[in-house]
Each structure stands twice: as structure tokens, then as C-alpha cells.
Amino acid sequence: MVWDMSDTSPSDPSESRDARETTHENRDAPQATGHPETTENPDFAAMTRDIAEVPAVEVIVTVAVNLMSAAAVKLGLTDEGDKHKDLDEARKLVHALAGLLDASTTEISSFHAAPLRDGLKSLQLAFREASLVPDQPGQGPGEKYTGPVYG
């Protein structure tokens, strides 16, 4: 497989260049909505200005909430339950969340940190409960940063 910088998926090297170019032409054709796809670059100056106005604490909290949400889905804690359950992925997300909270302890106030730490502990306990062979206390995801978690 060969990745073309303008492709979002690999192409077969045996496929002719003309066939790939036809695919690129089709990508710019009007879609079912009747609106052509735009190939213009987004306004990076406006995006940078918007990001610059966001306080660091808000960025940290937003990332933490996104990690918590993704971990909950991977733990099967959503309405769809086991459909998206993947404990390996959940472990990585919980570990990343614990690392982020540990690293940002001095940067965010307890007003922001307390509910995030509570959510982290809930996810760690849910992980232990969902595991067929639970990790020993202190060995679970994120416990490197939080210490052992007990229910």
C-alpha cells in the first residue's frame, strides 16, 4: 500500500496514476447534498486567535472530560453497553487521564480538579470491575499516578 499525501486511505501501487487522479477529480464533484466539497484551507489565523483566547485551565479540563468520556465508552458504561467495550483502549485512556491530572495538579484549582479526580476514581473502579482478572491494587490503570484505588 502507498499513501498519497492527498489521500485519506492507502492506494494499491498497481493502480494506475490515471485511476488515482480520477478518484481525486471525483472527490471535488458535487455531493448528494448538491454542494461541492471545498478544498480551501481553513482560516488558521482566526482559529489561532480563538485558541489564544481560551485559558489553559479550560483547555486542560476539556481534554480531561474528553478522556473521561472516551474511557467510559470503552468501559461499556454507555447506553450501548458492550458494543464499544474495549478494555485495552480503556486502560490507555484512564492512564492518560491520570497522568494529565497528576501533571496539572498545581495548574488547576481544586474547584476544577476535585470532580475530575472523582471521575477518574470511578473509572478506575469500573475498570477493575469490568476486568476478568482484576489488577492488584496499585497496578491498575493510572494507579502509578494516583496510588492504589479501593472501592
Image (tube, rainbow, N blue to C red):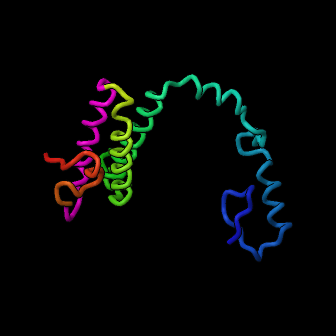
Place residue 46 in its image quadrant.
top right
Number of disc labels: 0
Q: Nearer the viewer, residue 60 or 103?
A: 103
Of all residues, the one furthest to the front in this rendering is 106
Asked whether residue 108 appears in the rendered view, the answer is: yes
Secondary structure, magenta segment, majority class: helix
Horizontally, residue 91 falls left or right of residue 26, namely: left
Q: Nearer the viewer, residue 101 or 86?
A: 101
Residue at the image position 33 percent from the left and 55 percent from the top: 91
Residue at the image position 70 percent from the left and 33 percent from the top: 44
Residue at the image position 25 percent from the left and 45 percent from the top: 146
Q: Position of residue 47 (x, y in %)?
A: 65, 30
Q: Position of residue 142 (x, y in %)?
A: 29, 50
Place residue 5 in its image quadrant.
bottom right
Of all residues, the one furthest to the left in this rendering is 151
Horizontally, residue 14 falls left or right of residue 115, namely: right
Asked if residue 21 is positioned above or below residue 107 in the image, the reply reads: below
Which quarter of the rendered picture does the N terminus lie within?
bottom right
Q: Is residue 108 magenta?
A: no
Asked whether residue 36 appears in the rendered view, the answer is: no
Q: Nearer the viewer, residue 88 or 58?
A: 58
Of all residues, the one furthest to the bottom in this rendering is 14
Q: Position of residue 117 (x, y in %)?
A: 27, 36
Q: Position of residue 75 (x, y in %)?
A: 31, 52
Asked if residue 56 is positioned above or below residue 145 in the image, the reply reads: above
Residue at the image position 48 percent from the left and 28 percent from the top: 56
Of all residues, the one furthest to the right in this rendering is 18
Magenta stretch, residue numbers: 110-134
Q: Nearer the viewer, residue 150 or 129?
A: 150
